[in-house]
């Protein structure tokens, strides 16, 4: 209004109108430009994040393939180095000349061959069990995990216990196997690297999610360590955990309690993966 | 020039009918009704002018109220669904009608161009436009903001109202001035054309979706796993 009064004539009013309109227009354009440029920067940043995420996925995929290859090589080595020689030895005992030997030698050879074949059966059973634990297949995740924890506890090195609060319904077989492998890997890492005195596993259900939490008093990982190790070239075990979690469409959280006395690893798994797709 | 501004109003309508006829997005529907209303208003003004019936001020008054109401409905759907927005925006047209009616019937006594209601409308809509843009900054869409319909509609409001703001608030006192009338026609037509071009661009854009995916599993895990070493 000051400008209007100050103008005092038609020309003054016109100037106010023209400059006011231009000013408002320029302000509007500036505002829009700022928003657009800022948003473009945000999008560029998001794309970079997306690219990093894709790279991470590639690493996880590679880790998963490497893990499978290693597993195959281990099985091949077990069969070649252990089962192969055992069966070859058994064959030696049971050669054609055996019928020309006297009865006592024949009996001894058959007994030895039988012994070796028994060992081979046991060996093959062990290999098979390492691929799919029979307790897990027959009795479910709770029994399989408790079995593992009892074995660890029995060693006397570490105090291990597991408690399932709500295990009324069984998960799908493939889900159970993946969870079992994740927990096995986590527990193996804790025993190997953390120097913990105890490991305790708890299971619970909340809404559509299963939760597994491992507490231990060793030197554990935090979420940022886990993320960092996941991006680094080493740490195949952690990458396998991450890729299995991804298959399960779950989450994993590494944390330390407020008193800094024990570390927590929490796994969140949806009950029905298909529902989340 | 004035006629050119009026004729371009048909442009967004044509684009809507070609590209967005089957689009169910509510914001777009509101803009469609707005464009139709502007065209009807232009036709009525033209007919009244032909028959020399001088109720243009009243027509402006009705136009302001309808325009503001449609803009408010647009913002109601376009702005993020927050409680404060959901409660303030629907109340705006009612408050505006009271203020505009008071100004038109009591202050100007129906005889003058009502700059107050025009200015008030411009200020409120500009604030809502700026709020929309500020909210858009905070959102990290992967989709560019300028590839959405709502953005271009907002820009058309923003530029049109910012550009005509001074024109309308001065019109009440200056409408008898010949030089001002020329400027009025030019500025109004320029920003009308700009608005219509921007609305036409909006009709070519992708629908705007403000839905954000919510990650599952926000559970108080410490509550779920009360851990006490001594008990285990």
Image (tube, rainbow, N blue to C red):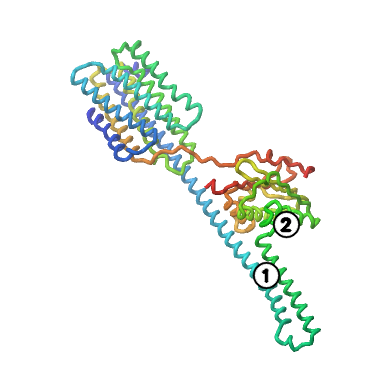
Real-space Cα separation, disc 1 to disc 2, in angstroms:
23 Å
Q: Residue at x 74, y 85 (%)?
A: A98
Q: Residue at x 65, y 56 (%)?
A: A181
Give the x, y percent position of residue A219.
72, 50
Q: Which residue of the protein is positioned furthest toward the bottom in this rendering?
A: A100
Q: Chain of mark 1?
A: A
Give the x, y percent position of residue A10.
27, 19
Q: Secondary structure at mark 2?
A: helix
Residue A72 vertical placement versus A231 (above, below): below
Residue B71 vertical placement versus B144 (above, below): above
Dot 1: few (<14), some (14–19), or many (≥20) neighbours within 10 Å?
Answer: some
Residue behind mark 2? A192
Q: How many marks?
A: 2
Residue B89 vertical placement versus B19 (above, below): above
Q: Residue at x 70, y 72 (%)?
A: A82
Residue behind mark 1? A78
Residue B187 visible within the image:
no
């Amino acid at each position: 209004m000051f400008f209007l009064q100050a103008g005092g004539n038609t020309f003054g009013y016109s100037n106010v109108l023209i400059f006011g309109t231009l000013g408002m227009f320029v302000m509007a354009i500036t505002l829009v430009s700022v928003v657009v440029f800022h948003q473009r920067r945000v999008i560029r940043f998001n794309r970079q994040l997306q690219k990093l995420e894709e790279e991470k996925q590639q690493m996880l995929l590679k880790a998963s393939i490497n893990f499978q290859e290693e597993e195959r090589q281990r099985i091949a080595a077990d069969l070649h180095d252990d089962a192969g020689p055992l069966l070859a030895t058994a064959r030696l005992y049971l050669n054609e000349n055996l019928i020309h030997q006297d009865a006592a030698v024949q009996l001894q050879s058959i007994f030895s061959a039988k012994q070796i074949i028994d060992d081979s059966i046991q060996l093959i059973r062990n290999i098979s069990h390492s691929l799919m634990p029979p307790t897990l297949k027959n009795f479910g995740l709770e029994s399989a995990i408790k079995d593992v924890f009892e074995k660890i506890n029995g060693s006397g090195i570490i105090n291990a216990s597991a408690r399932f609060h709500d295990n009324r319904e069984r998960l799908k077989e493939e889900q159970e196997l993946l969870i079992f492998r994740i927990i096995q890997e986590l527990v193996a890492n804790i025993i190997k690297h953390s120097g913990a005195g105890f490991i305790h596993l708890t299971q619970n259900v909340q809404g559509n999610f299963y939760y597994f939490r491992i507490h231990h008093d060793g030197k554990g990982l935090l979420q940022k360590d886990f993320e960092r190790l996941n991006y680094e070239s080493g740490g195949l075990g952690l990458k396998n955990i991450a890729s299995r979690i991804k298959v399960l469409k779950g989450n994993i959280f590494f944390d330390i309690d407020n008193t800094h006395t024990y570390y927590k690893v929490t796994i969140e798994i949806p009950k029905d993966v298909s529902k989340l797709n | 020039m004035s006629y050119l501004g009026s004729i371009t109003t048909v442009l967004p309508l044509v684009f809507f009918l070609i590209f967005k006829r089957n689009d169910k997005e509510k914001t777009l529907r509101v803009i469609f009704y707005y464009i139709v209303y502007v065209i009807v208003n232009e036709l009525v003004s033209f007919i009244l002018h032909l028959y020399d019936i001088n109720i243009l001020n009243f027509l402006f008054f009705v136009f302001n109220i309808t325009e503001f109401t449609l803009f408010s409905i647009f913002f109601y759907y376009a702005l993020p669904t927050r409680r404060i927005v959901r409660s303030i925006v629907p109340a705006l047209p009612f408050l505006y009608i009271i203020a505009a009616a008071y100004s038109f019937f009591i202050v100007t006594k129906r005889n003058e161009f009502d700059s107050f209601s025009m200015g008030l409308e411009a200020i409120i809509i500009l604030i809502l436009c700026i709020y929309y843009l500020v909210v858009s900054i905070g959102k990290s869409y992967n989709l560019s903001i300028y590839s959405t319909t709502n953005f271009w509609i907002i820009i058309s409001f923003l530029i049109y109202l910012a550009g005509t703001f001074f024109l309308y608030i001065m019109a009440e006192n200056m409408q008898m001035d010949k030089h001002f009338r020329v400027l009025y026609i030019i500025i109004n037509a320029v920003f009308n054309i700009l608005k219509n071009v921007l609305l036409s661009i909006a009709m070519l854009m992708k629908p705007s979706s403000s839905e954000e995916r919510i990650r599952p599993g926000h559970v108080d895990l410490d509550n779920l796993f009360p851990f006490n070493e001594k008990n285990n």
